[in-house]
Amino acid sequence: MTENTEEKRLRFVKTDNPPFWVKPLIPILALVGTFILTSGLIMMANANPFEAYYYFLLAPLGNKVSILEILVKSTPLIITGVAVTYAFSTGYYNIGAEGQLYAGAIAGTWIGMSAHGMPSFVALPLMILGGFAAGVAWALIPALLKVKLAVDEVVTTLLMNSIMAYIVSAILNGPWRDPNSGWPQSPEIAPSAVFFKLVPRSRLNFGFLVAVALVLILWFVMNRSTFGLKMRAVGLGKPAAKFAGIKVNRTILIAALISGGIAGIAGVAEVAGIHFHLISEISPGYGYTGVIIATLGSLNAFGVGLAAVFFGLVDTGAQTLGRALGVPVYLGEVTQATMLLVALGMLLLQRYRIRRM
Amino acid sequence: MFIVDMQKITKIFGELLANDHVDFQLRKGEIHALLGENGAGKTTLMRILYGLYQQTTGDVFINGEKAIIHSPKDAIKYGIGMVTQHFALVPPMTVAENIVLGYTDNIILDQDSIEQKVGAAAKQFGLEINPKSIVRHLSVGQRQRVEILKALYRNASVLILDEPTAVLVPQEVDILFETLDRLRNDGLSVIFISHKLDEVTKITDRVTVLRDGKSIGTVNTCDINTRQLAAMMVGRDTFGVTRQTDINPESKTILEVENLSVLDDKGLPAINNLKLSIREGEILGIAGVGGNGQKELAEILCGVRIPTSGSIKIDGTNLVGKDPLEFSKLGMGRIPEDRHEGVVGDLTVYENLSLEYLDEFTNKGVLDRKTIRNNAENLIKKFQIKAKPTDKIKTLSGGNMQKVLLARVLSRQPKVLIVPQPTRGLDVGATEYVREQLLEQRNRGAAVMLISEDLDEILCLSDRIAVMFEGEIVGTINTQDATPEKLGLMMSGALREVA
Amino acid sequence: MEVFIVNLIAATFRVSTPILLAAIGETYSERAGILNLGIEGIMFFGAFIGFIVADKSGSLWLGLLVAILSGVIAGLLMSLLTVTLGVNQHVSGLGITLLLTGLSLFGFRLVYGGRSTPPAIPSFQPVNPFPNVPFLNTITQQYLLTYITFLVIVPLAWFIMYRTRFGLHIRAVGENPESVDAAGINVYLTRYIVLAIGGGLMAAGGAFLSLAQLGSFTHGIISGRGWVAIAIVIFGNWSPVKVMWGALIFGGTFALQLRLQAMGLQLPIPYETFLALPYIVTIIALVIAGRNASYPAALLKPYRREG
């Protein structure tokens, strides 16, 4: 006589039908968990966690200047988050958004520098298109290698990031080195190529509108377009998609290229909206953070937008907190990462139910 | 005394009764075959003996002592070794490394010394193996020998082989049999799971036949002939209750398959110059024990596998080389063998239902949601699918998932319908429904190819039966002419006949 | 000219040490089937914590020890996420990198405030077993850690991987976890151990930079060396000795172009070409291997026992 006579006890059982209250609870629990984990650090900085979180998350929402700053900070995250979402939805793990972003930044700068005399309504779209094209070009090799030769894209896209960093360095130390200062930064782009400000005396610029537009487009593509359905089918069930007649490889290739192109646009937005010339620090890792944003946003358009704005809030709030209570501003990154890891852990737990068996 | 004595073994998986009070005894120094169709319970029984499953009730005795076997490690301690159908080897490592994996007390591995040990063992058992070879470079037959050596190295006195010749070419089969013969003479006891009668009669001392989870009987090989064995394997009480088949010889042949050949995923021939044809308004049942090429045949006809040669013609148009979408468009209706590879679990019912014919539901690149919704509602009603259009497919029962796939394909009124294992894993109600649908399609004039490992299903639905064995159709007969003996002989390779 | 070459060789060993340590850690991890993108963050945190502990306690070795310990813990965190919880490996790794980078910078700012010049500590001093041999003595002047890395860690890593039972298990787990499970070996435990060891090595690599090479800690102390290590693992075909050569090549190219730049040498092509070359070669190698790349077959797939 064997296993059926074991005593009944509570067990975790895998299920596809989590209780309905689980899903909305996750972000809340994640936030609570993050709060608990970060309070230790806050206390090490001689601050009161509750007071700190007020300055961290609530105060920035209270005044116009910081709200605008939140939107500014979230702009590149929204764009890279959207970019990565296209690729991940299809099962293509594009970790190369960072390099694609810089490719776009280079293209944007080049067009921007050549735009003297061009009216804005020509220069801006041109830069965006150029950035998109550059991102596509940089994403092409890993995408082709994956589709034709089954070479893993995670590794190749990572390697391409490193190569692009060297290209940027070579350009900034060579042909585009600022002749006036000698620093490795490019000459400024033409005034007509600058992303106009949306609110005077703030940094909020056209780039934010581009980001919002990209989110809306993402939503439309994913939920209303045929290609979007094909992408999701391939990502969620490749054999079934193939069986139903979907051209799987072509879908993956196109999604990968779109992903690269949009990441390129993020680069353009940074050059044309914030820095106005190309420097090697255009991106402190937006491409990688995009992966985190896309994951936290569960690969859906509004989730991604929300996650990006939340990260923007955290970044801004970290600065507010730093000024108010002297807590080092890096708490922001720690909070973002903790939020991610806690949320991921919980997302997995939602696959289980507790049953008595 | 028996070296292995399994008494009243019962194993239940959920609702499935895989083994029903099965008795099985193995004598020392004999080669004993376990014969039966798919689903008869042979592999389940042996996996219980090897500790991969635990029996629901029943006892196992080894050399007269009661044995508690919770895992392969326990089984190995009792001297039982098993070579499964899918080898458990690590390809980039050497033979020697594979053999000592998990069975060495040394923390430091000296390549030379383990190669020596393994080499010595190979010699001792008379197995031609080079311990230095990398497994990836070995042929299937050689890999099987490595698996056998692995078991013997762990001092197995009982060796279980699960369908060992399924992956071998004839010359390798001879070598295997010589090896088994020699090992038997040295005292090893062998259990040989098979469905091939000629092999069973060639090499074994005794045969136990399983059917539908029950043991039909154990006989001495020399006392019985293949006809009787075939009948035991396949015979059932309900045999003879077949449909009235009124085949119209005038009706047009719609599907013609000629000279079809293909290799399986391991590079071995799966289908060999296969030829068959189906007429309008008939159901052709493909019978046979699983693993004889049925899976590959279904995949080719579904458009997801490309044959190395041959043609598939619907109404004269050759489909080979076209992608799955064109298959559908040319009238080849198909459902996959594994439902989960036909529907995307995380997408909704209405999305899945529209997935196969997206251009009809598209308007300039945008999904025509109204049409998609209507399509879903119609099909749900017509096919009685118990689900809302917005439900995610993965929340549906197996039967309803199958209905979704059927609905999707039948709504197109296909000329040809390929249905592999259509009722596998479905409950009684769903099974009946699916079978009714197939008959309805036949009556509508479609040509239906039913591939099934369930012989009852084949008998009750088909007009003609084609038996597949080792990648060929070895015989096609009208259902009313089918007898258990005939079918059993064909399914086990002992008879070839064409109607 | 000879002086140039000899200096170059010496510099190559020095520069390669941290990335080699991290690469060996990553090699073990990937061999067992886990791609650890947390490598950049683990190196960074190792550099930081090693520095702070060394500064506050006065003991460099204590700093190194604590750094290694932190790497082990980070490795265990990675295992918890990817092995036990089955979370996507890329996201877990990037999350850990973000977390550890943030923690390091937070901690640094907290302790040292917003200084513009980073504090310096007396770093490890190089040793030289052959101080009087001409030419050779330049090459043999290396940090003890460098000697340990090349003469102890690499051979040990090779030995464990190919000559011990544990190494056999690691390789099997990364290729075919089902066979290993059937053979009675604990797949999960093996992966946990490997990630812990790997993390420790990665953190040691980071600590080398702050405790030996730099004697300080800055924002850009790692700047991408973690990703370099990942490239080296592939370049070196997941084999410790080949990875060592890969590290030397990547390190050598870096040292070479630094020297050429310092000499003010003007080349028709930018220096960055040299730096990019090893990466391009790695991609080409992947293309050539194509489907037959000797990836550990189970890389990136979480293991779940069926039934």
Image: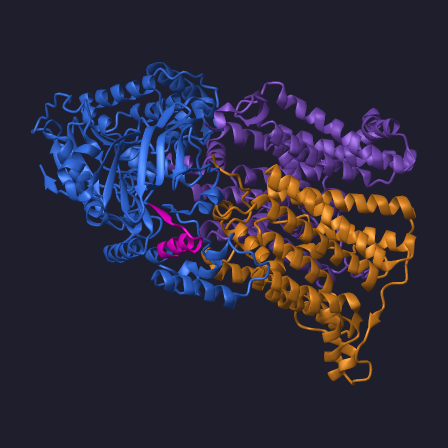
User: Which residue is painted at 26% across and 57% down in the image?
Assistant: B178
Residue C228: image x %, image y %?
Answer: 66, 58
Give yes or no for residue B159 being in the magenta stretch: yes
| Residue nearest the observer in this picture, B23 or C208 | B23
Name which quarter of the figure residue C248 lies in. Answer: bottom right
Using the image as rendered, state which of residue B215 and residue C51 is in the foreground: B215
Work out which quarter of the rendered image holds the C terminus of chain A and state it: top right
Q: Is residue B486 above or below residue B239?
A: below
Instruction: Indicate the quadrant where residue B13 lies.
Output: top left
Q: In the rendered structure, which segment of residues is drawn in magenta?
A: B144-161
Give the colour of chain C: orange
Q: Which quadrant of the figure has residue C133?
A: bottom right
Q: Is residue A286 visible?
A: no
Chain B takes which shade in the image?
Answer: blue
Residue B387 % position (x, y): 43, 17
Q: Is residue B488 left or right of residue A54?
A: left
Q: Quadrant of the N terminus of chain A?
A: top left
Q: Nearer the viewer, residue A175 or C6?
A: C6
Q: Is residue C206 left or right of residue A97?
A: right
Q: Residue at x 16, y 24 (%)?
A: B239
Query: What's the colour of chain A in the image?
Result: purple
Residue B59 relative to residue A102: left or right:
left
